[in-house]
Image: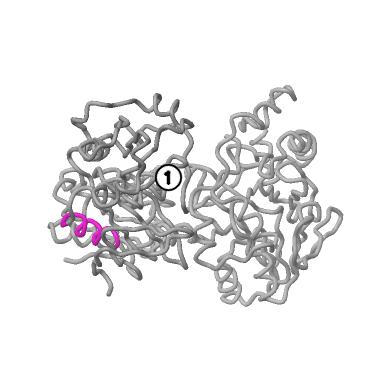
Amino acid sequence: MSLNKMHASEVAAKIINKNDLFILDVRNEDAYADWKIDGESVTSMNVPYFDLIDGVEDILEKLPKDKEILVVCAKEGSSIFVGEELVEAGVQNVSYLPGGMKAWSEYLEPVKVSDLPGGALYQFVRIGKGCLSYMVESNGEAAVIDANRMIENYTSFAENKGLTIKATFDTHLHADHISGGKDLADQMGGTYYLPEEDAGEVTFDYTPLKEGDVFSIGDVKLEPVYSPGHTIGSTSFIIQDQFLLTGDILFVQSIGRPDLAGKAEDWVTDLRTTLYDRYKEMAGELTVLPAHFSKVEELGENGLVSAQLNELYRVNDGLNVEKEEDFRKMVTENLPPQPNAYQEIRETNMGKISPDEETQREMEVGPNRCAVN
Amino acid sequence: MSGTVQQNNKISGGMDMIQTDHVLDAKGLACPMPIVKTKKTMKDLEPGVVLEVQATDKGSKADIKAWAEKVGHYYLGTVEEDDVLKHYLRKASDDETVPETKHDHVISNEELNELLSNDAYTLLDVREPAEYAFGHIPNAVSIPLGEIEEKMTELSKDKKVLVICRTGSRSDLAAQKLSSNGFEAINVVPGMSEWNGETTSNL
């Protein structure tokens, strides 16, 4: 009997398929309280590894006898240490997560949303962090929207399908994760687009993303729609008159928050107009595809996060605040904490600072907090 | 050198020297080893001494702090120098939780606050240099308890000496020593652990 490995992809599969999983998280209590692996079928328990250095006897009673036990820590060293102690103590079916929470934060699950003329639309679910990015592919061409910094996920996906990435788009200047849009475009010889209104302080070359442009990726049509409110430049996409990529403006269970750059008061009217006028005029049959999810319950079949627009007008509380004043209150008061390191993340996305990869990882650790819940 | 403990090390900590009793080199070690070694080292140390743990694992800061607080050691702080994190910990001592003071001239933190600008008094901080370095009352003079005998001549006998430490226990011993050497010494209780006034740091 020995300690097994359970890779992030296997953990993701268990969560998506709702298979039972017991997690022993051995990070310190603050780290666990801030952010952990969640899932409807996941039970977790936190005991810091430094309480287990002299042995695991005290916790053996609390471990399930009939479930697979996954030991998790920040990187992996402590989970191997504790995992081996458990194996030595005779516990069955113990694994550790290689790469720990860092690997979990970086794992992307590609989920097919739908077929499109000459190709398909994919949602890349960053399940540990709640970020969603997209790839449109048609007749050998591809575009990526809101790419994460781990760009090899997109390049290897494109390579396997023989696709050329022509364009990368950011729907807005992100504050919760580091964008891979610019690097991905540079590496693949494509063009990087960013809404001009968000790019005032950007130090590198980009192509302004504007409403009125129409992009053709193979036989698929992408239309940007100016939809400010989360940021002043936030731009949505309508793909092939079927899908609405809402960025951080509208989520399945909530709406975007307008305050990330300290502009809650200024942007609340824009957010209201986007959600209550602009989107409302659109076809209710559009499938909403947001840039985030906040709870794992939002993961649908195969892990896909989506909803129909008119359904959201029925059930999403953020779309059903009658009085403008109440709406203003909701989006400016009692906001959740800012994402970890959001200032540094914004500066990185503007090209003002270039932290090394390890630092970028550290900056992104933790949950995303872009939504008003 | 990895994992060895050196004695009586004096190293530069920012602008000032942080003197520590012991140094543990945990550089290059990944989690959980910095804590495993710290725990082992602490076990063999005398209560009240300060250990400097040098580590390169970024996660060690939050973990050392959480661990120390849990087991009752006193986490002083961390300084970063050239990618090396230096964590300072003071080993728990039993007499600290319930200080039994014997020196009879005692004042409270509040009373001390009233005397800070009074020229007739010297404020003497008898904690370890590392504790002093991470935060002390401005103008407090630093002489660790262990050096009080040899260094008390640096103090003026014309002034009353207000003696402070973390909880009132070390300052009690220092006040007694000063008294028996002709100083008018006053112990501040409880001391820095409950001090809400101004502090300054050498780092």
Residue A281, percent from left and from top? 80, 38
The image's colour scheme reads one colour
Residue B152, percent from left and from top? 29, 47
Is B20 on the left or on the right of B17, as rendered?
Answer: left
User: In the image as oriented, which residue stretches furthest toward the right?
Assistant: A212
Is A31 on the left or on the right of A64, as rendered?
Answer: right
Query: Which one is in front, B155 or A360?
Result: B155
Give the crowd class for mark 1: few <14, some 14-19, many >=20 residues within 10 Å. Answer: some
Query: Which one is in front, B159 or A208?
Result: B159
Is A191 on the left or on the right of A296, as rendered?
Answer: right
The answer to which quarter of the image holds residue B42 is: bottom left
Q: Identify the image quadrant of the C terminus of chain A.
A: top right
Residue A42, percent from left and from top? 35, 46
Q: Identify the image quadrant of the N terminus of chain A.
A: bottom left
Is residue A221 at all visible to an observer of this figure? yes
Q: Residue, x 64% and y 49% (percent of image)?
A: A289
Is A297 on the left or on the right of B166, as rendered?
Answer: right
User: In the image as oriented, which residue stretches furthest toward the front?
Assistant: B158
Query: Which one is in front, B186 or A305?
Result: B186
Q: Residue, x 59% and y 74% (percent of image)?
A: A161
Query: Which one is in front, B52 or B160?
Result: B160
Residue B113, percent from left and from top? 44, 28
Give the answer, above or below, for where B173 lies relative to B60: above
Q: Identify the residue position indicated by label 1 in the image.
A: B135
- The subunit carrying tag 1 is B
Amino acid type, residue under disc 1 in the picture:
Gly
Give the answer, above or below, for where A331 lies relative to B127: above
Q: Main secondary structure of the magenta part?
A: helix
Q: Residue, x 21% and y 52% (percent of image)?
A: A52
Is residue A22 at all visible to an observer of this figure? no
Magenta part of the chain: B34-44
